Structures are given as C-alpha cells and as structure tokens.
Image (spheres, grey):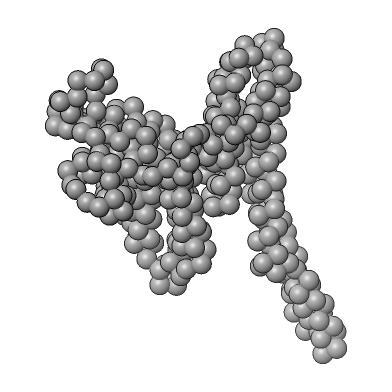
C-alpha cells in the first residue's frame, strides 16, 4: 500500500513543482494586461476609422496627419507638458485603486489645493527654492485634507467613496468659486477681463526645463511622484499591507492589518497627490488662480490610470499617449477633420480597456479554479490509495 501512495505523492509533488512560480505568474499577468491595453488602443483606432469613413472623412489621411506629428519637436515638448498633470493625477487615482477604492474626487481635491496654494503662496516671501517647496507642501496638505473627508466617511460611517467623492467634487467647486469671488480675487487687477487672485511672487514660480518650446519643471515632480508611487506600493511593508487590504480585507484583518486605517491613509495620500495636479499651470504658466485652471485633469487621470493598469510604468506610457493625442489633435483641423475625434478615441480606449480586462480577469479566475480543482483531485486520489 505504501508504494502506490508514494508514487501518487511523487506525481502530485511533480505537478505542484511544475506549476508557474509567483514571479513567472506575475510576469505572465503583466504581459497579458499590457497586451490588453495595446489591444484596446487598436480597437479604438479601428472604431474611430469606421466613424471617419461613415462621415465621409479620409481616415488614412487623418491618422497619417495625427501620428506623423510625432517627429515634430514642438509637438513632442507639448506632449510632455500635457502629460505632466496626467502622470500625477493617474498616480493619485491608482493609490486608491490599490486599496480597492475609487477616488473620483481628484478634480475637487485639485481645485481646493489650487486656491489654497495661490493664496498662501502669494502671502509669504521666501527664497526661491523654499518658496517652491512651500507651495508644493501647501498643495499636498490641502488636497490631503479634502481627500481625507471621504476616507473618514468611509471608515466611520461606511459611506461609499464613489458617492462621497462625487458629492465632494460639487462642494469643492462651489466652495472654491464662492471663496474666490468673495474673498481672494485681486481687485487691483485691471488688465483685461480675466479675474484672478494675486500673482505668485517670482520666487514661487516653477523653473522651466526648456524655454522654447516650453517644458515646465513640474515634469520632474511628476516623474518623482511615479517613482515614489512604485517604491511605496511595491517595495515597502506599507505597500504590501495596502495591496493585501485592497485584495481581501478580511484576510488582511486576520493577519493584524487594520483595513480602516489603510483606507484613511490611502485617501490622504491620494488627496495629497491630487493637490499637485494643477501645479503645472499655477506655478509654471499662470502664476495665479483662475476659475478655469486645470479643468478636467482629475477626470482625465482616471482614464490614464485605467489604461496604464494602475502601474507606474503603464501610467508613464498611457500619459504620454493621451498627452500626444491632445498635442497633435489641432493638426487635424488643418485637414478639415474635427479634432474631437481624439476625445472620442480616448473614451473608446478606456471603455475597451475596462471590457477587455473584465474578460481577462474572468478567464484567469476560471484558469486558477481549474488548476486548483485538478490538484485537489490528485490529492484525493492519493488519499484514497492510502
């Protein structure tokens, strides 16, 4: 009886040993998700080509014009400039995703931080480096405080973060507009009809990396944010707890991790990063708060995060893609092609990513279940022989 049992156990051991290791499984998942994002881009291109063809537009000429601009220096610099806030916004959203939270409130958190930074930055006088650091710190604190409200409501009252962040967006936009109009608008500004706050001193301006074509120094801040995001989530004990809590809060609680605390910290970090989203314009271009400053950057970050699979490397490439599409879209009008086709393309990309990833996730879950069932059957057969 022992010999058949030993043979069965040996077969089972070989089967388990032949299964992919954690590292190879992770690499396989990364390859699959990367391929799904690329496929989503091709799907969007194909659908937009059909739309152009149906509306009697030359889709070949449209795409050759659009992607032919990739060699132009001005477009490349403009791509980096437009991608800078998208990098930060997507990182802010992705921090929440890792905790299984959907922070739709980046737009409101950014708006609160913009006004707070404009007012505080104009009220102090500091040396250049310290003044820039002060403004960035104010932006992060303001964004974290506003994002922390949703975290508090989630932990203490069980309010769904999607609902709370959407409502907080409306509150932030109205609150900031009221405070700006009644308390912080620069009454001494008589140049033109544009209403704004007092201008930031030149010591608070973010230096440019390139003057012409313009490339702001906030790009360095954005790249540092992506690097720190990667280190925090994948290389620290906190990041492991964050991913564990987001994956299975019950299991994480059983190992001593407090999911409520992780939710609160995640929303604070996400809000802090959201506060930096508008600094590319405030400290680099305009140097004062205006009502239309940084519009839609918070919502666009969600698209970039989804296409980039919530990973810093993916965010880098998807941010560059969205930045390039926005930078090169103006050339389409010269060919009598509506530049809005780019916006349609971006929306289709996000929808395709969500659908394809859902299909892949269900396929992967079934594959894991089949493998586990096969191993259990082998173990049961070995026990029956015993």
Can you name the residue that lies furthest to the bottom here? Answer: 2
- Pick the residue in front: 119 or 140: 119
In the depicted structure, whether residue 342 falls above or below residue 37: above
Question: In percent of the image, x 20 and y 44: which residue is there?
Answer: 120
Question: In percent of the image, x 33 and y 37: which residue is there?
Answer: 282
Residue 367 in the image, given as x and y percentages of width and height? 71, 56
Q: Does 95 sit left or right of 75 as displayed?
A: left
Which quarter of the figure is the N terminus placed in? bottom right
Q: How many marks?
A: 0
Q: Does 143 sit left or right of 372 as displayed?
A: left
Query: Residue 245: in sight, yes or no?
Result: no
- Pick the residue in front: 297 or 43: 297
Q: Does 77 sit left or right of 280 as displayed?
A: right
Q: Give the quarter of the image for residue 249.
A: bottom left
Q: Does 73 sit left or right of 131 as displayed?
A: right
Question: In percent of the image, x 18 and y 29: which residue is there?
Answer: 185
Residue 238 in the image, given as x and y percentages of width and height? 43, 66
In the depicted structure, whether residue 181 falls above or below residue 366: above
Q: Give the quarter of the image for residue 118.
A: top left
Can you name the residue that lies furthest to the top here? Answer: 56
Question: In percent of the image, x 25 and y 52: which residue is there?
Answer: 127
Residue 9 in the image, given as x and y percentages of width and height? 78, 81
Query: Residue 73: in sight, yes or no?
Result: yes
Q: Give the quarter of the image for residue 117.
A: top left
Which quarter of the figure is the C terminus placed in? bottom right
Residue 337 in the image, given as x and y percentages of width and height? 62, 14
- Pick the residue in front: 150 or 277: 277
In the depicted structure, whether residue 158 falls above or below residue 22: above
């Amino acid at each position: 009886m022992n010999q058949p049992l030993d043979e069965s156990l040996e077969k089972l051991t070989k089967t388990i040993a032949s299964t992919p290791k954690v590292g190879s499984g992770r690499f396989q998942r990364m390859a699959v998700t990367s391929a799904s994002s690329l496929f989503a881009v091709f799907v969007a291109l194909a659908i937009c080509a059909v739309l152009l063809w149906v509306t009697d537009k030359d889709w070949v000429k449209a795409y050759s014009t659009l992607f032919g601009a990739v060699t132009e220096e001005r477009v490349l610099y403009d791509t980096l400039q437009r991608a800078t806030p998208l990098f930060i916004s997507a990182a802010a959203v992705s921090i929440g995703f890792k905790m299984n939270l959907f922070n739709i409130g980046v737009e409101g958190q950014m708006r609160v931080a913009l006004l707070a930074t404009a007012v505080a930055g104009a009220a102090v006088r500091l040396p250049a480096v310290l003044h820039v650091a002060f403004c960035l710190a104010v932006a992060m604190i303001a964004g974290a405080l506003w994002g922390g409200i949703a975290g508090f409501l989630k932990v203490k009252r069980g309010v769904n973060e999607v609902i709370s962040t959407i409502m907080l967006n409306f509150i932030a936009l109205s609150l900031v507009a009221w405070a700006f109009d009644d308390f912080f608008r620069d009454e001494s500004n008589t140049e033109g009809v544009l209403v704004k706050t007092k201008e930031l001193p030149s010591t608070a301006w973010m230096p440019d990396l390139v003057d012409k074509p313009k490339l702001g120094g906030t790009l360095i801040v954005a790249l540092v944010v992506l690097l720190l995001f990667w280190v925090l989530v994948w290389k620290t004990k906190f990041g492991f707890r964050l991913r564990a809590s987001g994956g299975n809060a019950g299991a994480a609680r059983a190992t001593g991790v407090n999911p409520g605390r992780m939710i609160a910290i995640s929303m604070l970090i996400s809000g802090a990063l959201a506060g930096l989203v508008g600094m590319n314009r405030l400290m680099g271009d305009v140097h004062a708060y205006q009502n239309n400053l940084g519009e839609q950057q918070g919502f666009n970050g969600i698209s970039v995060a989804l296409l980039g699979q919530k990973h810093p490397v993916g965010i880098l490439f998807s941010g560059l893609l969205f930045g390039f599409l926005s930078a090169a879209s103006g050339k389409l009008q010269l060919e009598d092609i509506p530049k809005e086709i780019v916006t349609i393309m971006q929306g289709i990309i996000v929808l395709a990513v969500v659908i394809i990833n859902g299909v892949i996730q269900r396929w992967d879950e079934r594959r894991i279940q089949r493998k586990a069932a096969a191993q259990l059957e082998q173990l049961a057969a070995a026990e029956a022989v015993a």
